[in-house]
Image (cartoon, grey):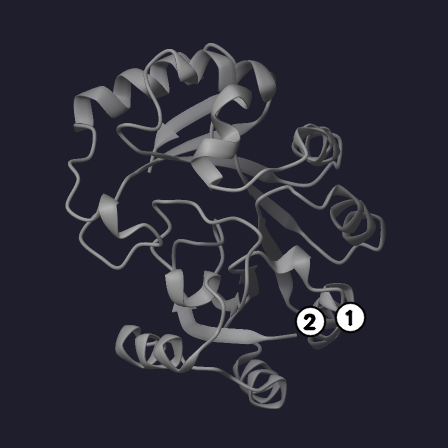
Amino acid sequence: MIIGGLEKLSLLDYPDHLAAIVFTQGCNFRCHFCYNPMLVLPQSGKDVEIKKEKGFSPLSTEDLFLFLKERFGRLEGVVVTGGEPTIHPDLPEFIKKIKDIGYLVKLDTNGTNPEMLAGLIEAKLIDYIAMDMKAPFAKYSKTVNVNLDWDNIEKSVKIIMKSGLPYEFRTTVVPGLLKKEDFHEMGKIIQGADKWYLQAFKSDTDLVNQEYLGKKAYTSKEMKEFAAIGREYVKVCEVR
């Protein structure tokens, strides 16, 4: 596992649990608005310097597991995020080591690897799932800036909703990429889901696409209007 960074304590990322966040290196998307370019773009000398500036630094698995063992009892969970964790073939083995210590594990994913997702659920290696719903079908490739197999996204949605695990879908709402009517189309994809969180776009930090730096986000009122549309399709839709 290639680990790009560690956040030692989060009160927000794993609902109702104190957790550490493990950032895996590498992603198969190139979302314009992603504010972790140091975890997404190919590693180079320049990327290492960015990591240092942003507080990310490569971490050995030995150091990570030493930290987790020392903090067990004070921390309850570990969030495995990225980048995109499911691009790593050794993800099941990596998570099993975390579970063997005694932690709950939350997985953040973009939903492009339904086979990996199904295997983790079947092996009881994850306890909570968060999947990004980037855009409606017609806009997905433009939003993530790569060509993709849409069937995999749909498969992952179904797997998650039938898993019996607590889960959430989440969407970063970027002006120019998403419009009001798009929330109806996305809502249909995840219709009946438990939770859908809408996240405001941040443009005051490093982004994968520098052209989005400084772009204005939707207002609080507009975000609430989008959430109201979401509630026509899912049980809970809130702005976060």
Quadrant housing residue 26? bottom right
> What x and y, as percent, mark residue 160?
69, 36
Depth order, front residue of 46/109: 46
Which label was assigned to residue 102?
2
Depth order, front residue of 144/190: 144
Q: Relative to 12, is 59 on the left or the right?
A: right
Q: Looking at the image, which residue is at 33% across and 38% down?
A: 240
Could you say whether the residue bearing mark 2 is in a helix, strand or loop? loop
Whether residue 151 is visible to the viewer of this picture, yes or no, is yes
Name above or below for residue 204 compared with residue 56: above
Could you say whether the residue bearing mark 1 is in a helix, strand or loop? helix
Quadrant housing residue 142? top left
Which label was assigned to residue 139?
none
Whether residue 134 is visible to the viewer of this picture, yes or no, is no
Foreground mark, 1 or 2? Answer: 1
Name above or below for residue 83 compared with residue 42: above
Q: Relative to 207, is 220 on the left or the right?
A: left
> What x and y, as percent, mark residue 146?
53, 42
Q: Relative to 151, is 137 on the left or the right?
A: left
Quadrant assignment for the N terminus? bottom right
> What x and y, as percent, mark residue 212?
24, 44
Q: Looking at the image, which residue is at 30% across and 33% down?
A: 174
Q: Looking at the image, which residue is at 75% across and 58% down?
A: 125
Instruction: Mark 2: give few (<14), some (14-19) or many (20+) Cα within 10 Å.
Output: some
> What x and y, as percent, mark residue 106?
59, 55
Instruction: Mark 1: give few (<14), some (14-19) or many (20+) Cα within 10 Å.
Output: few
Name above or below for residue 232 compared with residue 157: above
List the residue tagged with mark 1: 93
Please name the amino acid that badge 2 sits on. Answer: Gly
